[in-house]
Every structure is written in structure tokens, then in C-alpha cells.
Image: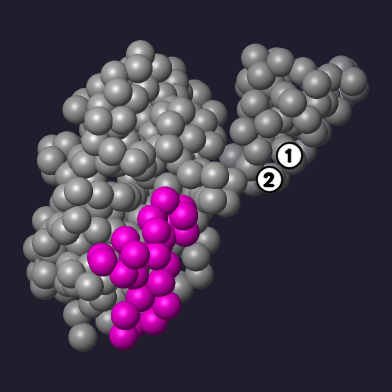
């Protein structure tokens, strides 16, 4: 992508300068339209018009480059070994390459009018930031779990929902509630509140769900799980999960190495999509990589929930070793 001034832009030097600045913030810095509007003190609608003008007048030229190089043979080996519908493998183990590949896979799955569910975590955050920009107000972005004040701002599911909606020009539906509460009764009361209910009801109409895969550690290495980082679980609860053989999690749902979901009492207190609802989503995309996550990814694939796995070559090789 290059930025280039043409004759039409030169005739409007003030607006042209602003167009260039807005375009750089959107395309280079990957800020959302709302973030740009706040930074520059203008409305998000003006930001959208300036971006359209920047493209029309040639200030921005978009060139489509090849996707990150893929190891398709290794992807087929993972598909055959684990029965997953599709495995997309990046030759590079760079986190950004895996995120770009995941974003392009997801972009290819989305149609106008679809609803896409978004989980939490650093991997999902990178995918969201790498999503190709659209302007489709018929798409709905749905937050799949409540949040926690212990999560880094870049991993907060509410913020990720908003950012993805801005990138796609879509509508967002957030959950203004914690991921876990102290009782099933309190959970029931919260999800009946109109603002929360309006989002939770959308769990049954998703076309795509995008998740990371949390790892509880074990012999493969250290823990890497937004569920653990969220601070929503006590030390005793975490010990209890590992005690029953949990190796990782999908959003708020821990699973064992053989793909069995455990701790139903935990799920009953979670303000999040249920496993039954997740199984009903036509396409569940998991983006996860790293040698330390091999055991957790194996367990996640064994659950039968994941339809598409995006990972890197080193991790895929570990999976089939």
C-alpha cells in the first residue's frame, strides 16, 4: 500500500492533508474509525467519508499481496490425523503471519448478513487487528463472554468486539458483565437484564465463531490462557481443574487431553456462550500456535468443536509427531 498525492487532492490542500493523516492512522496504524475520530476531534462519519475520498482520489492505493506462505501438505496431515474440517498452516512461526492468515481465512468465510462471535485473548486480538477492512452494516459482531478487569486492555472481549465492528463497518453487541459470577442464580438474573439478554440471545444465530485455545501448561511448557489470566478463578479452582486433568480451555470451558469438557459447575456460573451453543455454530475457527500449546491444541481438536484450525508449521509438526 502506498500513499500518493494526485491533482484532485492538491486542489483541496486542507482536506487533502487531513485525508492523508486519517488514511495513515487507519491503514498503517490500524486504528479504528472511532479511535481516529477521538484523536482528531472529528466525527466517525467524517472519518469514513475521508477514507472513501482518500481511496477515490488516489491518496491511498490498495494492492493485494499474496497471503503468508502456507504448508498445505502439513495442513492436510493435521486434517487427516484429527478429523478437523480444515487446517491452515503458516510456514512462518511469526505471530503476525499466523494472525494475518487467520484474518484472511475468516474474511473469506464472512458473507453479508452474517453474525460472527468473538472470544478474548492476545491471539484473537492480533487476528482482529489484521482483518481486512470492510464497510458492511449488515454484519453483526457478538461478544462471546463477559470480561474481567484483570485482562489486558488489548485482550478485553468487549474492546475486541468494538474494534472488529469498526474494521468491518459492522454492528457490535457487547456484554457489559463479568465472565464469571458467584452463583448460578446470580448468573440467571444478569442474563435476564435487557442489555445483556439482547447480546446473549444472538449466540444461537452465529455463522462463525473465532476463538483462541488456552493452555494450562503441563509437560509442554508454561500456561498461556486468558481464562487463567482473567483472575476470575481462585487458586483452589485452578488446582481443581488441573486435578481433574484439564489441559486447556475454549473461552471459559476447560477440557482434558482426550477432549472431555470438565467443571460443569464453572460453566454454569459463566456469562458466556455454552458448549452446546458453540457446537451448533456452523464454523468455529481456532487460531493458536506455539510448541507449548501442542498438548492443549490436541485436546481442543479432540472435543470436536473446532471446524477450522489456523496455526504455524512448527506447531502442526508437533501435532502430527
Residue ID at (44%, 21%) = 171
Q: Secondary structure at mark 2?
A: helix
Compared across the picture, whether 282 is left or right of 108 comes to: left
In the image, residue 300 sits, relative to residue 253, either above or below, namely below
Q: Front-most of 61 and 68? A: 68
Q: Front-most of 256 and 9? A: 256
Query: Circle 1 is placed at which residue position?
Result: 24
Marks 2/1: CA distance? 5 Å
- Answer whether labels 2 and 1 touch (C-beta < 8 Å): yes
- Residue stretch in magenta: 216-241
**Residue 113 position by quadrant:** top left
As for residue 135 lying within the magenta part, the answer is no
Compared across the picture, whether 191 is left or right of 77 comes to: right
Q: Secondary structure at mark 1?
A: helix
Can residue 116 be seen in this snapshot? no
Can residue 184 be seen in this snapshot? yes
In the image, residue 265 sits, relative to residue 254, either above or below, namely above
In the image, residue 120 sits, relative to residue 288, either above or below, namely above
Q: Position of residue 163 (x, y in %)?
A: 54, 35
Label number found at residue 316: none
Residue ID at (50%, 70%) = 94
Label number found at residue 28: 2
Residue ID at (45%, 41%) = 147
Amino acid at each position: 500500500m502506498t500513499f500518493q498525492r494526485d491533482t484532485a487532492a492538491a486542489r483541496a490542500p486542507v482536506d487533502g492533508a487531513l485525508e492523508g493523516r486519517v488514511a495513515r492512522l487507519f491503514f498503517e496504524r490500524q486504528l479504528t474509525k472511532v479511535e481516529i475520530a477521538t484523536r482528531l476531534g472529528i466525527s466517525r462519519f467524517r472519518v469514513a467519508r475521508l477514507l472513501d475520498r482518500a481511496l477515490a482520489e488516489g491518496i491511498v492505493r490498495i494492492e493485494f499481496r499474496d497471503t503468508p506462505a502456507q504448508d498445505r501438505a502439513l495442513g492436510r496431515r493435521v486434517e487427516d490425523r484429527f478429523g478437523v474440517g480444515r487446517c491452515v498452516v503458516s510456514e512462518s512461526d511469526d505471530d503476525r503471519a499466523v494472525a494475518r492468515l487467520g484474518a484472511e481465512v475468516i474474511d473469506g468465510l464472512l458473507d453479508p448478513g452474517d453474525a460472527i462471535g468473538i472470544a478474548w485473548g492476545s491471539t484473537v486480538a492480533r487476528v482482529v487487528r489484521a482483518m481486512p477492512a470492510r464497510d458492511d452494516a449488515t454484519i453483526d459482531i457478538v461478544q462471546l463472554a463477559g470480561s474481567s478487569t484483570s485482562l489486558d486492555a488489548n485482550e478485553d472481549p468487549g474492546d475486541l468486539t468494538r474494534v472488529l465492528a469498526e474494521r468491518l463497518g459492522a454492528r457490535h453487541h457487547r456484554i457489559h458483565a463479568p465472565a464469571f459470577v458467584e452463583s448460578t442464580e446470580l448468573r440467571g438474573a444478569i442474563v435476564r437484564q435487557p442489555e445483556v439478554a439482547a447480546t446473549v440471545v444472538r449466540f444461537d444465530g452465529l455463522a462463525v465463531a473465532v476463538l483462541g485455545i488456552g493452555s494450562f501448561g503441563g509437560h509442554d511448557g508454561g500456561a498461556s490462557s486468558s481464562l487463567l489470566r482473567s483472575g476470575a478463578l481462585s487458586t483452589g479452582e485452578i488446582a481443581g481443574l488441573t486435578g481433574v486433568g484439564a489441559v486447556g480451555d475454549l473461552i471459559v470451558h476447560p477440557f482434558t487431553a482426550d477432549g472431555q469438557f470438565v467443571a460443569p459447575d464453572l460453566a454454569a456460573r459463566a456469562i458466556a456462550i455454552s458448549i452446546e451453543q458453540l457446537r451448533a455454530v456452523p464454523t468455529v475457527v481456532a487460531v493458536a500456535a506455539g510448541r507449548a500449546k501442542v498438548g492443549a491444541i490436541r485436546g481442543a481438536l479432540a472435543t470436536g468443536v473446532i471446524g477450522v484450525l489456523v496455526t504455524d508449521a512448527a506447531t502442526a509438526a508437533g501435532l502430527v509427531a
